[in-house]
Image (cartoon, rainbow, N blue to C red):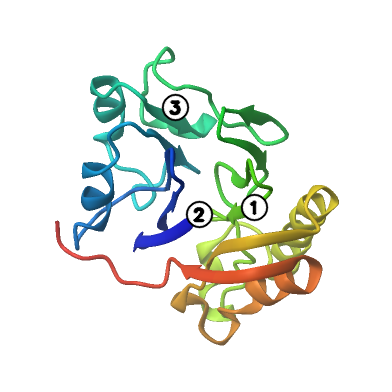
C-alpha cells in the first residue's frame, strides 16, 4: 500500500486493485487526477468524513455515477446537507457502524465536530485512521467562541472517542490527523494524546495548509 498526500485533508491509499480517496476537496497539483487517470481496472472508493466544504467536492456524485467501479462512501450528514440521492452511495457512514468491501473494512467512529472519523483495515491487516475533523479543538482562550463547549468538555469528548477507537484498534499503521495552526501552541495536543493512547506507525499531518484559489 502506498499513501499519497493530495491537499488539505485529502489522502489516497493506493493498492494494486483499488484506490481509497479520503476527503477530496481540491487537487491543485493534479496528484489525484494522475492517480485516477491510471486507475483503469481498479475500484475507486471516495470516503467523505463530513459535509464541510473543505472536505467535500460537489463533483463526487456525478463522478461516481458516470464511472463504473467508482463508489461514494459519504457520512450521514454529507448525504443530508449536500443532498446526495440516497440510491447513489455504496453505503452511508454512521458512527458505530462498519462497511465491508472486497478490499477493506471501514469502521466509523464519533467526531468532536460533525460527521465521523474512521479506521480502514486492508486485507493484509494494514490499518489507516483518518480523523476527518475529529480533534481536540483546544483553542486559545481568546478564540473559544469557535466551539460551543468549553476546552475541558472538548478534551473529555476527544479522549472518550480515542478510547473507543483504542478498544478496537490498539495500533494503527497510518494516522491522518489535523495539525491546525489556528490552535497555536496547542496544535499538537490532540495528536500527542492520540499517540499516547494508540500505537501509531506513521503520523501524517493534515488540515495545516491555507486554502488556495480554485
**Element under disc 2:** loop
Residue 57 image-quadrant placement: top left
Q: Which mark, residue 1?
A: 2
Q: CA distance from mark 3 to mark 1?
A: 28 Å
| Residue 55 image position (x, y, % from top left) | 39, 49
Q: Which mark, residue 139?
A: none
Q: How many marks?
A: 3
In the picture, measured across the screen, residue 155 lies left or right of residue 39, that is right
Picture residue at 82% right of the left edge, 56% below the top:
163
Picture residue at 53% right of the left edge, 66% below the top:
145
Residue 135 image-quadrant placement: bottom right
Q: Earlier in the sequence, mark 3 or mark 1?
A: 3
Any part of residue 112 in sight: no
Query: According to the image, label 3 marks what residue?
Result: 79
Assign the C terminus to one quadrant of the image: bottom left
Q: CA distance from mark 2 to mark 1?
A: 8 Å
Using the image as rendered, state which of residue 102 and residue 114 is in the foreground: 102
Picture residue at 43% right of the left edge, 39% below the top:
18
Query: According to the image, label 1 marks what residue?
Result: 126
Picture residue at 57% right of the left edge, 31% below the top:
93
| Residue 81 image position (x, y, % from top left) | 41, 31
- Marks 1 and 2: in contact by CB < 8 Å? yes
**Element under disc 1:** loop
Residue at the farthest bottom position: 185
| Residue 63 image position (x, y, % from top left) | 25, 29
| Image: 71 above or below 163 | above
Residue 170 image-quadrant placement: bottom right
Amino acid at each position: 500500500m502506498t499513501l499519497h498526500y493530495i491537499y488539505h485533508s485529502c489522502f489516497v491509499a493506493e493498492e494494486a486493485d483499488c484506490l481509497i480517496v479520503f476527503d477530496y476537496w481540491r487537487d491543485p497539483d493534479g496528484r489525484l487526477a494522475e492517480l485516477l487517470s491510471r486507475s483503469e481496472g481498479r475500484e475507486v472508493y471516495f470516503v467523505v468524513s463530513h459535509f464541510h466544504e473543505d472536505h467535500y467536492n460537489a463533483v463526487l456524485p456525478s463522478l461516481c455515477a458516470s464511472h463504473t467501479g467508482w463508489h461514494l462512501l459519504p457520512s450521514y450528514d454529507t448525504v443530508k446537507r449536500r443532498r446526495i440521492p440516497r440510491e447513489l452511495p455504496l453505503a452511508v457512514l454512521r458512527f458505530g457502524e462498519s462497511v465491508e468491501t472486497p478490499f477493506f473494512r471501514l469502521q466509523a467512529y464519533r467526531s468532536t465536530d460533525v460527521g465521523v472519523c474512521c479506521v480502514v483495515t486492508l486485507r493484509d491487516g494494514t490499518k489507516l485512521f483518518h480523523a476527518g475533523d475529529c480533534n481536540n479543538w483546544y483553542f486559545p482562550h481568546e478564540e473559544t467562541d469557535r466551539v460551543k463547549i468549553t476546552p475541558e468538555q472538548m478534551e473529555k469528548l476527544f479522549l472518550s472517542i480515542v478510547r473507543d477507537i483504542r478498544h478496537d484498534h490498539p495500533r494503527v499503521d497510518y494516522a491522518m490527523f489535523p495539525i491546525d495552526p489556528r490552535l497555536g501552541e496547542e496544535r499538537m495536543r490532540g495528536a500527542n494524546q492520540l499517540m499516547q493512547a494508540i500505537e501509531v506507525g506513521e503520523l501524517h499531518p493534515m488540515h495545516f495548509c491555507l486554502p488556495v484559489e480554485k
